Image (cartoon, helix red, strand yellow):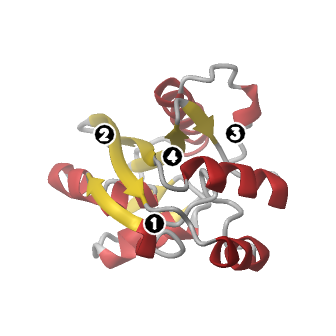
């Protein structure tokens, strides 16, 4: 049994589908306190901040702690979660017909070991259909997602090529996690 230090339903689903027993306790770390615009640095700092908050609260004596965060980058830009429909549209237009990378950092700590991993999955997308993109934005599914994308949903029909694990793009590289636990 591990403690998932995240409020993400997608990360919970990844663990469930991988048959990893967990309880979910997210935190309240303020990502807006991070000043860097470097995508890898931002992702690491967000994960570290969340980890430190939850480690102080729960420790690892009862069970190991797992924390993760993801960001998206395209054209060298850091794409976080969309603030509104216009922001979602802006991010999706940047990624449409372009190369997009999802960076996911995870920190796993038990009494015996600590693992810090930064994984990247890169997609080359076809141009997004404008009507489909509008439907997706209006559905609200794009909110709460780094870069406003869902590689397992909206983006799937537009994937021309992929390098890396889909789980990384969904928010937690379960293939690497399983190797350690």
Q: Nearer the viewer, mark 2 or mark 3?
A: 3
Picture coordinates of residue 42, whole percent (x, y): 56, 29
Residue pointed to by mark 3: 29
Element at badge 1?
A: loop
Chain-order first, disc 2 or disc 1: 2
Query: Is the residue under label 3 in contact with that under label 2 (CB below 8 Å)?
Result: no
Foreground pick, 148 / 135: 135
Pick whichever, 120 or 32, lies toward us: 120
Give the residue drawn at x 54%, y 43%: 71
Question: Residue tagged by mark 1?
Answer: 151
Q: Which mark is residue 111?
A: 2
Quadrant including the N terminus: bottom left
Residue furthest top as drawn: 36
Kindly indicate whether the residue at mark 2 contacts the one at mark 4 (C-beta within 8 angstroms).
Answer: no
Query: For the residues marked 2 and 3, what is the alpha-carbon distance in whole angstroms?
Result: 23 Å
Determine the secondary structure under disc 2: loop
Q: Is residue 171 left or right of residue 9?
A: left
Report, in whole angstroms, how far the alpha carbon at label 2 lies from the one at label 1.
Answer: 34 Å
Q: Element under label 3?
A: loop
Which of the marked residues, 2 or 3, is nearer the chain's N terminus?
Answer: 3
Q: Disc 4 or 2, which lies upstream in sequence?
A: 4
Q: At numbered mark 4, what does the secondary structure look like: helix, strand or loop?
A: strand
In three-dimensional space, the C-alpha distance between marks 4 and 2, rounded to whole angstroms, equals 25 Å
Q: Is residue 70 visible?
A: yes
Q: Quadrant of residue 141?
A: bottom right
State the image coordinates of residue 80 (x, y, percent, origin top left).
65, 44
Q: Nearer the viewer, mark 3 or mark 1?
A: 1
Residue at point 52%, 62% (across, down):
127
Whole-percent x and y of residue 49? 59, 31
Q: Which residue is mark 4?
A: 70
């Amino acid at each position: 049994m591990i403690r998932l230090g995240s409020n993400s339903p997608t990360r919970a689903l990844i663990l469930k589908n991988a048959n990893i027993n967990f309880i979910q306790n997210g935190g309240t770390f303020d990502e807006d306190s991070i000043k860097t615009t470097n995508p890898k640095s931002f992702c690491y700092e967000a994960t570290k901040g969340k980890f430190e908050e939850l480690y102080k609260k729960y420790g690892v004596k009862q069970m190991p702690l797992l924390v993760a965060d993801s960001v998206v980058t395209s054209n060298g830009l850091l794409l976080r979660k969309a603030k509104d429909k216009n922001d979602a549209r802006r991010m999706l237009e940047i990624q449409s017909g372009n190369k997009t990378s999802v960076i996911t950092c995870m920190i796993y700590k038990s009494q015996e070991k600590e693992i810090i991993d930064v994984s990247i999955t890169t997609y080359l997308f076809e141009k997004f259909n404008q009507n489909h993109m509008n439907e997706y934005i209006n559905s609200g599914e794009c909110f709460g997602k780094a870069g406003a994308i869902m590689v397992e949903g909206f983006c799937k029909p537009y994937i021309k090529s992929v390098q890396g694990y889909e789980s990384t793009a969904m928010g937690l590289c379960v293939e690497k996690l399983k190797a350690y636990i």
